[in-house]
Image (cartoon, helix red, strand yellow):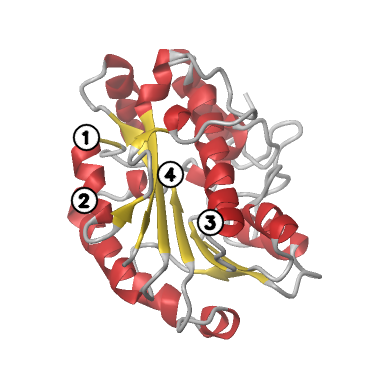
Amino acid sequence: MTNPSQAVTGGAGPAGGGIDTSVPSIARVYDYLLGGKHYYEVDRVASEAMIDAVPETTLLAAANRSFIRRAVRFIVGESGIDQILDIGSGLPTAGNVHEIAQEINPRTRVVYVDKDPIVLANGRALLSANENTIVITADLRDPEAIFDDPETQRLLDFDRPLAVMLGGILMHIEDEEDPQGIVATIRDRLPSGSYLVHSGCADPGEPRARELNQIFYEYNMGSRCFRPTAEQAEFFAGLELVEPGLVPCSQWRPSFDFPDPDNPAHAMVIGGIARKP
């Protein structure tokens, strides 16, 4: 077995720059599940444990990513939003938020937020020539710092509507870290006409969900990843849900790029978009 401090073949390369390879990184595990190459042995082991327990895990990761892409098309293409704050953005992959948004409207401004050193390094390298897109170092647990970051303030105009993306990130926030309070702070900072996008794993009573939740806990990636749909609906308190509401990602305006749409496992990942009046 490869030493956890080393990359696997085709992986992220030698560790350095503050990268902790003693525990899995959520961003790198997600990258592995999507078929990426920015991961270490510890991430591969955690990912394979998830796949062994629930073979549909890769499908769920792809379904979440597909939802995010459709959400961006809706926000920019249908709703006319031209500024996006993507929190917990993860590693670059095909069909990044800024690529989709700026293909529709080249003037769209995007701020990516993450704390993983590999995410930050790759993002900054990818975006070095893109004046309308930046990556900042911050943590969802401190939303005020995200909004008040000088780079966020420079690129985004908070006197106009924007969209905040929370794609699959709140599921890694523990109850004692007050996810509802975190999202309430975000909602309060949004101008009228803004949108909130959320996706996450649901149905903690489902046997496969319990198995995955246990693996997340064992690998230090969160212990409350699977929350009831009703609890997640509270993230949109005071906002107007866009049809069809908070539903399995497979049911949110599905399009040609949605993977294996009839698989019942899709009930385990839900998503929704809401507008601030």
- Give the amino acid type for the residue marked by disc 2 in the picture: Glu
Dot 3 falls on a residue whose secondary structure is helix
Residues at discs 2 and 3 in contact (Cβ within 8 Å): no
Q: Amino acid at mark 4?
A: Gly
| Badge 4 density bin: few <14, some 14–19, many ≥20, Cα 10 Å | many
Q: CA distance from mark 1 to mark 3?
A: 26 Å
Q: Which residue is mark 1?
A: 228
Crowd around label 3: few <14 · some 14–19 · many ≥20 (10 Å): many
Sequence order check, earlier mark of 3 and 4: 3
Q: Residue at x 24, y 45 (%)?
A: 233
SS of the residue at dot 1?
loop
Query: In the displayed structure, would residue 222 be above or below residue 82?
Result: above
Alpha carbon of mark 4 to alpha carbon of mark 2: how far?
Answer: 16 Å
Q: Position of residue 65 (x, y in %)?
A: 55, 39
Q: Is residue 90 shown to the viewer in this render?
A: no
How far apart are labels 2 and 3 at the CA level?
A: 21 Å
Name the foreground residue: 96 vs 23: 96
Depth check: 12 or 3 in front?
12
Q: Which residue is mark 2?
A: 234
Q: What residue is shown at x 70% (from left), y 57% (from top)?
A: 104
Looking at marks 1 and 4 on the same chain, the residue that comes earlier in the sequence is marked by: 4
Q: Which residue is mark 4?
A: 168
Residue 28 position (above or below residue 33)? below
